[in-house]
Image: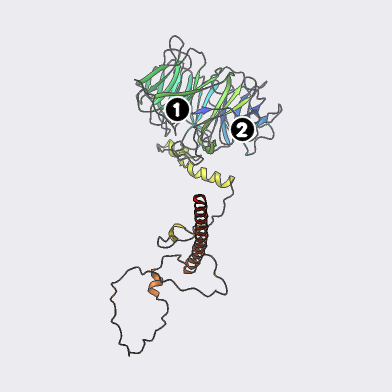
Amino acid sequence: MAFMRKSKFRHVFGKAQKRDQCYDCIRTTKQSWDRPFAAVNPKFLAVITESVGGGTFLVLPLSKVGRVDRDCAQVTGHQLPVLDIAWCPHNDNLIASASDDCSVMIWNIPDGGLVTNMTTALVELRLHQRRVGLVIWHPVAANVLLSAGSDNKIYIWNAGKGEAFLEIDLPDIVFSASFNFNGSKVVTTCKDKTMRVIDCRTGAVVAENKPHESSKPAQAVFLKDGRIFTTGFSRMSERQYAVWDENLKNMNLEEIDNNNGVLFLFYDPDLNMMYLAGKGDSIVRYYEITNESPYAHYLNLYQTKDAQRAFAFQGKRGIDMKSCEITRMYKILNSGLCEVIPFTVPRKSELFQDDIYPDTAKDQATITADEWFNGKDSGPVMLSLKDKFHAMEGTTQTAAKPIRKANILDNLNTATPQKAESAAPPPQPAAPEPAPTPVKAAPVKSAPVSTPAAPPADAPAPKQETRPASSENTAALPPGFDPQALIDDIRKLKLIVKAHERRIKTLEERVSQYEALSSEEENGEKC
């Protein structure tokens, strides 16, 4: 009997937001290059757009939802169509773009978005001899950028100085590239059907293998533990995914379907989840990556009737943790509508969920570009999402002043009843009433009492001394004990008892009268 594998992500579901929370009238590019054509970070959404006589892409603040004006400001510095864009992981205002004009440019977007067209780039990187179709940022080192072009070359740049640190020659066009967790290696897939793991400082090929049999574009991404996840096509043009170890030894290969679109990979290293989406598809599949065979466990899919032309996935720093959201997809349709689709783990509690929100990479570089070029490796700086969650609560909700209450349970006394509805003792009156006979409190430690001998008849009566209340008895009383409140309670109880006694006496009199009447009636009947 087969049992379903347990997973906290099995019931993850996506649900598109209402149209007024989406973006409309976006003229997406019609280029056939195999890239997602969109990128998103916690501040902005960027989409490569269609233009005449040059290359442009649109940058929108995430809060600017609704209809996009036809003449809105765009980035228009490239001479030919833009093929790829990527946001810097260490600065939410920096974006890199790769173009058909053989250049890579870096742009600084102001916080409020663009007011006029941006034509001048912050940095221009020009060494490629043919079009540049791929650009990615280093995950750890500041201002380190990788670009790949149709000239079969990869350049690793020190973007802050505008200099190329390393040039890598490959046999064919590069389809995809991905840094490992600390950025010391990069995995590439090429048109020659070969996947290679390359040392980023020397350019030496560490390992290589043929992941899929078809020459159609394959995609590869490094997992957090050093393994590699790929998508590609079989000899019969069936779409596949595969998991590989560090030495590019195949661990598992599965077929998906018979569609023709390239499946792009979006990896969540915090939760070890993989999202597969393709241009022209209307389905987004997601898997959980584990160390158990088959290593990639299918979870679920999100499907609509409209196919996507461009798409991007949001990172942990830009999601809504109050609704248990783990990622958010921005799906641009052929009609120009950009749907916002949150993917949510269903939870009832509104508290912070530790199991689905571990620490994530912070928007801060760990080392400088020069340190990395000199051989230093380091992991990313981690950000506690729990602190961010509480910070969001503090900014969105007014913190209420705490109300200090008396502890009712500490004031309970099993020997005598006490008012349960009053948490604090009542205030003392200014002129106290004549108190009844005081009740002696039982001592904490009882000592054996010896009966004194009776005094002689002619002996004078002993003089009674009035001693003040013993400090020992006062210290032995429980904290918060109020004798006056106890006396008031006893007085009320006595009144209640007296009222019940009168009620009982009245009822007894009525019973006796009823018995007398009934006996008289019986005697009359006998006569």
Residue 10: numbered disc = 1
Q: Residue at x 45, y 73 (%)?
A: 438
Which colour style is shown?
rainbow
Neighbours of disc 2 within 10 Å: few (<14), some (14-19), many (20+) = some
Q: Amino acid at mark 2?
A: Ala
- What secondary structure is found at the residue carrying circle 1? loop
Residue farthest front in this picture: 527
Q: Point out the tag, 2 or 1, that comes first from the N-terminus.
A: 1
x and y, in percent, of residue 92 in the image: 56, 37
Residue 168: numbered disc = none
Which residue is labeled 2 in the image?
121
Q: Report which quarter residue 54 is drawn in.
A: top right
Q: Report which quarter residue 208 is drawn in.
A: top left
Is there any visible trace of residue 435 in the rendered image?
Answer: yes
x and y, in percent, of residue 63 in the image: 63, 36
Q: Amino acid at mark 1?
A: Arg
Q: Nearer the viewer, residue 85 or 268?
A: 268
Q: Is residue 336 left or right of residue 190?
A: right
- What secondary structure is found at the residue carrying circle 2? loop
Neighbours of disc 1 within 10 Å: few (<14), some (14-19), many (20+) = some
Q: Report which quarter residue 298 is drawn in.
A: top left
Is there any visible trace of residue 211 in the rendered image?
Answer: no
Q: Residue at x 52, y 16 (%)?
A: 261
